[in-house]
Image: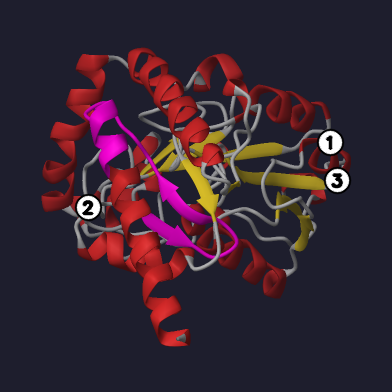
Amino acid sequence: MQAVVASCFNFDGKSFEGRKKIVYDDVNFSTVHYVWQEQARRGAEVVVVKSDGINPPMEALLDAIDEKTLLVPISHVLFRSSGLYDAKKVIDHAHSKGAMVLLDCYQSAGTVPLSLKAWNVDMACGGSVKWACGGPGAAYLYVRPDVLPKMAPMATGWFSHAEPFAFDMGPMRWAPDTWRMIGGTMPIPAMYTARAGWEMLAKLGVENVRKKSLRQTKLLRDKVEARGFVVNTPQSDDQRGGTICFDFPGADAVSRELSAQKFFHDYRPKCGLRVSPHYYTTDEELDGFLAALDAVRAKGATSSARAAY
């Protein structure tokens, strides 16, 4: 979806009021970074704002957005720390400078309530793999209705055409509605796979999911801090998503053993273990995960001591 949006811009100084500056942070997801970094080959001015690796660099990002900025593609929740952007604040500031915001909700949708219309966001995107439990291939893109007519993606396909089944070989005639952003044939099996997860979230209510998530992530944070681990997730409720990221020496090896034992989580460099309790996770399961982690670490320490002996 990010690549589709990027293909809407020429960066030639002749469209979108001559704007060609793209601003985001260094804790954006790598795929997103690769998409926008490569737009420099087409004339974009790409500005990557430095962070502390944990918290969204709010003030530095706002300072970098100016009257030359075209787009601010940021992650609502950072994948490496679960740090949460104040989306409304970024959007309001970008709009005051005449810039647009593309909000990546991949790490937030389904566990953090979204108010895209109230925030007046220009565009938002994401997928179904994370909190929607829907599997890969079912991505989504929201474009505000007044922004949509300005978008003419070069990365396109027959379903973006005003009459796709006319098989017209003439100049592209864009669909007047959201279909213009669809491109080629959709991955229908992926759509069906994802449906149940989104329906479940709609039934439960994301506000209820968020309430439970905040309680359990606080509980989990307290428990890993008590073990002396480094927590790479902001402490405040209004500054974190649904994941607790924590690190310690040898965390990568411990993560591999836990995965082999089917204690599901993941590991990321400069982040550590990412543990994400969801609406189906019990407190007892969190305790079970930590007990297994303690056992793996103790076994590793014993093995190291024997090897040294």
Helix, strand or loop status at disc 2:
loop
Q: Label 2 neighbourhood size at 10 Å, few (<14), some (14-19), many (20+)? A: few
Q: Nearer the viewer, residue 228 or 99?
A: 228
Q: Which residues are magenta?
A: 265-288
Q: Relative to 281, does residue 264 appear above or below in the rendering?
A: below
Q: Is residue 269 magenta?
A: yes
Q: Secondary structure at mark 3?
A: helix
The residue carrying pointer 1 sits among few (fewer than 14), some (14 to 19) or many (20 or more) residues within 10 Å by Cα, namely few
Per the image, the residue denoted by label 3 is 64
Q: How is the image coloured?
A: secondary structure
Q: Position of residue 32 (x, y in %)?
A: 55, 58
The residue that appears at 71% across and 70% down in the rendered structure is 40
Q: Of the residues under marks 1 and 3, which one precedes in the sequence?
A: 1
The residue wearing badge 1 is 59
Above or below 195: residue 75: below
Left/right placement of residue 66 relative to residue 223 reads: right
Closer to the camera: disc 1 or disc 3? 1
Secondary structure beneath dot 1 equals helix
Residue for badge 2: 186
Q: Disc 2 marks which amino acid?
A: Met
Q: Position of residue 281 (x, y in %)?
A: 25, 31
Circle nearer the N terminus (2, 1): 1
Q: Up-down: is 159 above or below 122?
A: below
Sooner in the amino-acid sequence: mark 2 or mark 3:
3
Tell me where residue 239 sits by quadrant.
Answer: top right
Residue shown at the point (66%, 67%) measured from the top left: 37
